[in-house]
Amino acid sequence: MVTQLRERIEEKGTILWEERVRGGAHWSGIVRRGVTLRITDLEGGSNVSTLLFSAEDHLERYNMPDTLKAQHTAFLTKGFVCYSDMGRILCSITEDTCGWHDTICGVSNAAMVRARYGETRYQEHRNDRYQNAFDGLLVELAKYGLGKRDFAANINFFSKVTVEEDGSLCFHPAHSQAGDFVDLRFEMNTLVALAVCPHPLDPDPQYRRRDVLITARETGPAPADDPCRHRCPENQRGFENTERLYR
Amino acid sequence: MTYVTSDLDPAAAVLREVVPAGEPWMGIVKRGQRFRIVDLEGNQAVDTLFYSAARPEERYSAQDTVREQGNIYLTAGSRLLSNECNTMLTIVADTCGRHDTLGGACSAESNTVRYALEKRHMHSCRDNFLMALARWGGGLDKRDLSSNINFFMNVPVTPAGKLTFADGISGPGRYVEMRAEMDVIVLISNCPQLNNPCNAYNPTPIELLIWDAEGKA
């Protein structure tokens, strides 16, 4: 099914660069306005804990509540956009083959990973030690002078957590299949920080390293007839706010 | 919905303060003290953040709180966790039934997105937060505004993933009471929002009460 979807979705834009990020590892970089970043779950069941900041002003960052309430949603998929706290759109989700990305459950941390998977140290395990997303993202943030104060609510790409009627959380294992991908078209110059670590609610007793491929393409920012722009009046206003930065 | 009442006597409180509609409040609650917020007239959203008084980079985390309790709604028994997964406060009494922590705080900028570009001038919780932090000093500023709690606010989420701001389930005199498990800085915006039902389109005052730890005069 994924193969069919991949064939159906036209590959847009020239590839600028491509990089494989190893499961367990962390990564960061600047993605320009007009570039679409495809994150592909190469093996299935991956989780990519992600933070987004304006590249020019790190005080402006991904805001989970503003993203959810503007679009009346508790999850992310194709057609939704990721809002900053300043009423602007950092990126739009222009394609998505797995249908649900979590943004309410936060990240794994050292104590959780140690309790669940056991103690691993660099001394014995080298680069196979069990890394966690909190520490991995803190390291990436520190490269830009950022720290715990800047660590706001994140996105967990490829993970599905639903909310039952009584408010309880339900993690869906094996949600993302090998080859599933999500396309993020950047509407602002953005600092992207990723940690490819297991979702904090993943009940799998084994620490699984599931690599992802990130592919940057030159696609241009949202056109006038863009479906994300016209998803709701809120997004039309969000794009207006965003485009004022670049006029 | 379950309700848990508190037997603490307001006359014995060491602090009783009414926060008018649309105003911020900032103060310290010490470990062991009880902190009560009273929705005096009903359906008033109270946007709230907590910081460790000793080390403010440790602060309330909505994501860690909902994940570790396995539920998005806060009520009696909920432990309010920090970004380091330590318990900052525990909700010990609640006569409203549930509180939101996904809806965040309104801002001038989010009002332009949610309602109209012409709404930018309207008063908002994040403007309140920024003013309170600026007055407080101590190095806290916009960087420190993370996802907050909305006491008394009703933000239901469906199994299909729809999220809405619904009519409130609170009423006059309902309250939520917490026990501080560490010394915390409390930052409140008594929400001024006029564009959605979070305050029943009519922001109203709240009362804050603090009691010393049991056994302490």
Image (cartoon, coloured by chain):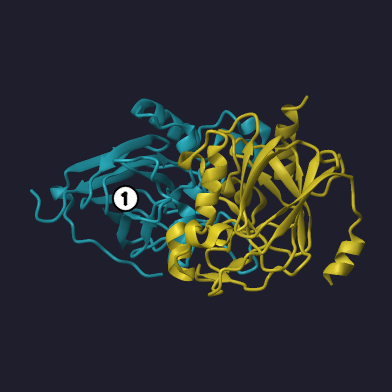
Chain colours: A yellow, B cyan
- Residue B206 in the image, given as x and y percentages of width and height: 34, 44
Q: Quadrant of the N terminus of chain A?
A: bottom right
Residue type at mark 1 is: Val
Chain ID of residue with mark 1: B
Most foreground residue, B203 or A25: A25
Q: Residue at x 61, y 30 (%)?
A: A57
Q: Residue at x 40, y 46 (%)?
A: B59
- Residue A54 in the image, given as x and y percentages of width and height: 64, 35
Q: Is residue A66 left or right of residue A41?
A: left
Q: Residue at x 75, y 63 (%)?
A: A42
Q: Is residue A44 positioned above or below B81 on the image?
A: below
Location of residue A236 (image quadrant): top right
- Residue A132 in the image, given as x and y percentages of width and height: 52, 57
Badge 1 crowding class, 10 Å Cα cut-off, few under 14, some 14 to 19, many 20 or more, is many
Q: Quadrant of the C terminus of chain A?
A: top right
Q: Is residue B118 left or right of residue A228?
A: left
Residue A164 in view, yes or no: no
Return the residue found at the far front.
A123
Q: Is residue A47 positioned above or below B44 on the image?
A: below
Q: Is residue B33 positioned above or below B20 on the image?
A: below
| Residue of label 1 | B38
Residue A211 in view, yes or no: yes
- Residue A190 in the image, given as x and y percentages of width and height: 68, 38
Q: Secondary structure at mark 1?
A: strand
Most foreground residue, B52 or A245: B52
